[in-house]
Image (spheres, grey):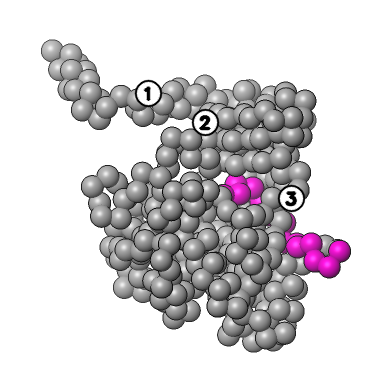
């Protein structure tokens, strides 16, 4: 298996074509986690007679599963990030079935299918179809640049905390709400009693758990770097900064294309009048998106302690009693200050600090 790190000399950047882009209409861009590339490709796919499978929240927002969209309106449920492990099932014809079985049936019925999931989801789907001798020439796949999801129980407890606090059921929920643009992400929850709640995602209990408490299997992810098996990988275009041609303060997607099917999806996207697409520098795009090639890493002792406390005492208790919570809060405060102080002022203060240190 080849190296995960693009800094290594054997990483073949020529095997990938990179693009960047975003929805031109503000209301569509704001509803997506980054630039909306996965949604835009899905819209083109449906317009050409295909169907799309992707991750969506359960009705109570306490978990995530898969859904199928046959119309552009049905794509709404796939928008924005789900930071939790997604159950590989779909509600179909009044019952829960394996999403892989549903895709297999669709392909056997001659339908053109687009599947959007994490790298491991795409890998599991392809392995299942091959084991069942299913022809998947009509299957197109997109995997999402993945940090490593946390457990669904984290979101379940977080939602229950909010519902207890507001004495009302959650009717809308996002962990990538663009309150002030692309960054920083906010939690945004709406309730049946009309109330609205917002907080900075990475300063929430949920955000802390997402950073520190993912599935152990993510440390051994087999779908990083050159080992991505999807036709295309899509995510936030980190590294895209103000002054670059493709920059948009409200979100930019990066598209890393590996196969001819991936190239076909890009060609279809070029026909869209709603999506602004740019050619991007592949090496720059990959190097600035480390989750494309790096596996999740965490301290097993801290993970085990958090896991035990979480299962015994619940999410909030596990967060505030974590041994790294104090350092984490301090880091988040620094990040918040940086966002409100101009870059010139930060550089000036660093120079002053350096002079004082050496005086």
Question: Is most of the magenta stretch helix, strand or loop?
Answer: loop
**Between tags 3 and 1, which lies in front?**
3
Structural distance between the alpha carbons of marks 1 and 2? 13 Å
Q: Are marks 1 and 2 in contact (CB under 8 Å)?
A: no
At label 3, counting other C-alpha atoms closer than 10 Å, the crowd grade (few under 14, some 14-19, many 20 or more) is some
- Find out whether residue 83 is within the magenta segment: yes
- Residue identified by numbered label 3: 58
Picture residue at 63% right of the left edge, 72% below the top:
51
Mark carried by residue 200: 2
The disc, 3 or 1, on the residue closer to the chain's N-terminal end is 3
Q: Position of residue 246 (x, y in %)?
A: 30, 55
Dot 1 crowding, Cα within 10 Å, few <14, some 14–19, many 20+: few
Q: Residue furthest right?
A: 94
Picture quarter containing residue 343? Answer: top left
68 vs 152: above or below: below
The residue singled out by tag 1 in the image is: 337
Q: Residue at x 64, y 57 (%)?
A: 55
Residue 130 position by quadrant: bottom right
**What secondary structure is found at the residue carrying circle 3?**
loop
Question: What residue appears at the point 40 percent right and 55 percent down from the top-left corner?
Answer: 24
Q: Are marks 2 and 3 in contact (CB under 8 Å)?
A: no
Which region of the structure is painted magenta? Answer: 81-94
Q: Earlier in the sequence, mark 2 or mark 3?
A: 3
Q: Is residue 331 above or below residue 264?
A: above
* Left or right of 35 in this view: 88: right
Q: Considering only vertical position in the picture, is 217 above or below 187? A: below
Residue 108 vs residue 259: left or right? right
Q: Quadrant of residue 101?
A: bottom right
Residue closer to the observer: 116 or 299: 116
């Amino acid at each position: 298996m080849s190296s995960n790190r693009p800094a290594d000399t054997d990483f073949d950047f020529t095997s990938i074509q990179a693009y960047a882009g975003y929805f031109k209409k503000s209301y569509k861009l704001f509803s997506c986690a980054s630039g909306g590339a996965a949604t835009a490709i899905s819209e083109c796919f449906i317009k050409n007679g295909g169907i799309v499978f992707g991750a969506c929240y359960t009705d109570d927002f306490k978990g995530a599963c898969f859904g199928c969209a046959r119309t552009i309106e049905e794509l709404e449920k796939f928008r924005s990030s789900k930071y939790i492990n997604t159950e590989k099932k779909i509600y179909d014809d009044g019952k829960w079935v394996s999403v892989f079985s549903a895709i297999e049936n669709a392909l056997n019925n001659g339908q053109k299918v687009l599947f959007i999931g994490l790298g491991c989801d795409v890998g599991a789907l392809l392995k299942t179809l091959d084991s069942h001798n299913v022809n998947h020439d009509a299957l197109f796949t997109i995997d999402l640049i993945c940090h490593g999801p946390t457990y669904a129980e984290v979101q379940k407890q977080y939602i229950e905390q909010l519902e207890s606090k507001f004495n009302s059921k959650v009717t809308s929920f996002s962990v990538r709400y663009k309150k002030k643009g692309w960054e920083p992400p906010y939690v945004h929850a709406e309730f049946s009693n009309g109330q609205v709640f917002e907080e900075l995602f990475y300063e929430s209990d949920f955000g802390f758990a997402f950073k520190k408490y993912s599935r152990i299997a993510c440390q051994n992810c087999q779908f990083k770097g050159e080992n991505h098996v999807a036709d295309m990988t899509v995510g936030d275009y980190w590294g895209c900064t103000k002054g670059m041609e493709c920059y948009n303060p409200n979100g930019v997607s990066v598209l890393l294309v590996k196969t001819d099917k991936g190239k076909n999806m890009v060609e279809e996207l070029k026909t869209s009048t709603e999506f602004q697409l740019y050619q991007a520098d592949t090496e720059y795009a990959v190097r600035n998106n480390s989750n494309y090639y790096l596996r999740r890493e965490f301290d097993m002792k801290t993970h085990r302690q958090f896991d035990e406390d979480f299962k015994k005492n619940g999410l909030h208790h596990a967060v505030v009693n974590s041994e790294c919570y104090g350092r984490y809060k301090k880091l988040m405060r620094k990040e918040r200050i940086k966002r409100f102080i101009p870059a010139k002022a930060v550089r000036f203060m660093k120079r002053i600090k350096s002079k004082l240190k050496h005086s």
